[in-house]
């Protein structure tokens, strides 16, 4: 029986968008193996196995795949874990800081995409969480922007390679979403008044608000499921119209 249970691996599953993805998957009766540096009790139930680890660690991926196969049939991989970085101009950015950002945002997506291409069967789906910063420049977030552009390119190449095996690869590109990342970004734009920075970011968005994590998670769910079976190689903005400007 358990071999027919749909299972997804979700990285960065403890909070923010990752935790919302776990909730939406659970509502759809999927089983989940979640990975995070800091596993959270709040996303744990008998359908969710949280594994502590760093998603840039190649060996962690063997553990995640083994755990998923023990739970049921691996049908999805969501590469969501990411960090925004320090918020510094490129002239003030060290190679170590640049490389650390690319490791967490891009290398982890590569490892997860490769694991998906190796271990998902036909009908499997990989979803990478890119960003509106994967389409355009953002001052003081150059490493993050470069890393997310790379995630977009990775997604497109993987989609072409996966298609012959019936494995789809897409990305979701959120705009500002109400998580601790946006709290940190608002603070880095205006340390004395993060609220003012937040208002400016909100005013710059055609929808005049940030996304709720669940709104991003619902798009991920659609890309994981059967209803999107002919959709591959896309990068879907979920940004209130920000990148349509
Ligand atoms: N929040 C936004 O406005 C926004 C906008 C565009 C894209 N994104 C992207 O969405 C994704 C999720 O972001 P969020 O806003 O939910 O952030 P968040 O900080 O709330 O959650 C990120 C989670 O990833 C985990 N994580 C970070 N590095 C890890 C590592 N090396 N190994 C394992 N786990 C790790 C963290 O512990 C945390 O639980 C990220 O890829 C981010 O770049 C977010």
Image (cartoon, grey):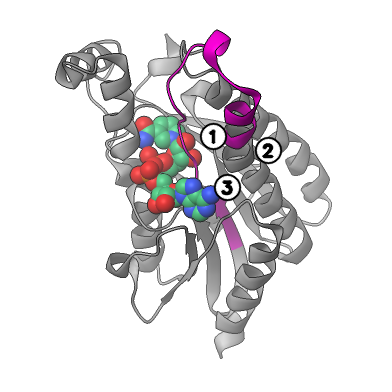
Between the C-alphas of marks 2 and 3, the distance is 8 Å
The answer to whether residue 99 is magenta is: yes
**Looking at this view, is 231 or 34 the one in front?**
34
Answer whether residue 244 is visible to the viewer in this image. Answer: yes
Give the residue at the far bottom of this rendering.
1
Image-quadrant location for residue 203? top left
Element type at mark 1: loop
Q: Quadrant of the C terminus?
A: top left
Percent x, y for residue 217?
Answer: 39, 48
Mark on residue 199?
A: none
The answer to whether residue 77 is magenta is: yes
Of the image marks 2 and 3, the number of the one nearer the N terminus = 3
Q: Quadrant of the N terminus?
A: bottom right
Segment colored magenta: 76-100
- Residue topped by disc 3: 127
Percent x, y for residue 37?
Answer: 46, 57
- Residue topped by disc 2: 155
């Amino acid at each position: 029986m358990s071999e027919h249970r749909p299972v997804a691996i979700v990285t960065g599953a403890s909070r923010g968008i990752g935790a919302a993805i776990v909730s939406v998957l659970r509502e759809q009766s999927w089983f989940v193996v979640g990975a995070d540096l800091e596993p959270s009790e709040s996303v744990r139930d008998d359908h969710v196995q949280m594994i502590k680890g760093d998603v840039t660690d190649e060996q962690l991926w063997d553990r995640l795949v083994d755990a998923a196969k023990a739970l049921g049939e691996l049908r999805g991989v969501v590469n969501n874990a990411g960090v925004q970085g320090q918020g510094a101009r490129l002239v003030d950015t060290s190679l170590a800081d640049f490389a650390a950002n690319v490791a967490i945002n891009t290398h982890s997506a590569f490892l997860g995409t490769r694991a998906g291409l190796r271990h998902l069967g036909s009908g499997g789906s990989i979803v990478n969480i890119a960003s509106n910063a994967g389409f355009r420049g953002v001052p003081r977030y150059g490493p993050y922007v470069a890393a997310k552009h790379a995630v977009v390119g990775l997604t497109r190449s993987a989609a072409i390679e996966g298609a012959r095996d019936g494995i789809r690869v897409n990305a979701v590109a959120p705009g500002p979403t109400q998580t601790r990342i946006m709290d940190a970004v608002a603070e880095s734009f205006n340390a004395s008044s993060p609220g003012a920075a937040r208002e400016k970011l909100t005013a710059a968005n055609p929808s005049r608000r940030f996304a709720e994590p669940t709104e991003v998670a619902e798009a991920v769910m659609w890309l994981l499921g059967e209803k999107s079976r002919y959709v591959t190689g896309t990068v879907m903005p979920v940004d209130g119209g920000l990148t349509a400007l």
